Amino acid sequence: MIEGSLARRYTRALFQLACEAGQEEKIGQEIEQFYAAFSGSELQAALTNPAFPMDSRKRILIQVANGLELSVLSIHFLSLLLERDRLAHLPGIVNCYRRLLNEAKGRVEAKVVSAAGLDAAMVERLREQLRGISGKEVVLQQETDPSLLGGLLVELEGKVYDGSVRTQLEKMKQRIAREY
């Protein structure tokens, strides 16, 4: 998802406060935890519905946040988003926060797609190879896609490394078609 300037502004403010408190990782996890409970649920419908009074929506948010055992900083931030009708920006805020945190910690996210699940040794070798390419600690997100047939598809820092059998077969098909 593309973050808007508003989401980036709120995220930078939250990140700065989290850094001052020494809780960057914890706040990031809490915001993601709340977003997981919020997105596409009845909670989202209730908190974003202007037909409900603001104080009722705020009580609901605080009850949910306390149930999730969120910190005071996270609760205040989420309450601010609610009061200013900015909860719609939460997906962008979550993504932007993750990116800021990874940048601050010298990490980079990579996505690897394979035809079948990868064993732990393969994942670790792949992580080491990607660390060599990026020069940073790599956080791997794994997905499976049986249509790849075999091989891997890796996305790292905006670049796609496609070593899938499906793509190799498609390239071969195009070469044969050009020759005839």
Image (cartoon, rainbow, N blue to C red):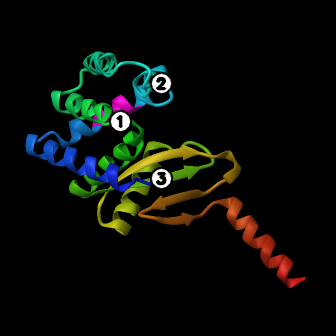
Q: Secondary structure at mark 2?
A: helix
Look at mark 3 in the image and give the residue it sits on: 111
Q: Name the disc covering residue 45, or none.
A: 2
**Residue lying farthest to the right in this orientation:** 180
Residue 44: x, y in percent? 44, 26
Question: N-terminal of the two: label 1 or label 2?
Answer: 2
Residue 38: x, y in percent? 42, 28
- Residue drawn at x 23%, y 28% is 75
Question: Above or below — where is 72 with respect to 28?
Answer: above
Q: Nearer the viewer, mark 1 or mark 2?
A: 1
Q: Secondary structure at mark 3?
A: strand
What's drawn in magenta, residue-wise? Answer: 29-35
Q: Residues within 10 Å of mark 1 (few under 14, many from 20)?
A: few
Looking at the image, do the residues carrying marks 3 and 1 touch, with CB atoms under 8 Å apart? no
Answer with the quarter of the image where residue 62 lies: top left
Q: For this rendering, which residue is in front, 79 or 92?
A: 79
- Residue drawn at x 29%, y 61% is 136
Looking at numbered disc 1 in the image, what kind of residue is underneath it? Asp
Question: Above or below — where is 72 with respect to 140?
Answer: above
Q: Quadrant of the C terminus?
A: bottom right
Within the magenta stretch, is there residue 33?
yes
Look at mark 1 in the image and give the residue it sits on: 85
Question: From mark 3 to mark 1, how far is it between C-alphas?
Answer: 33 Å
Within the magenta stretch, is there residue 143?
no
Looking at numbered disc 3 in the image, what kind of residue is underneath it? Lys
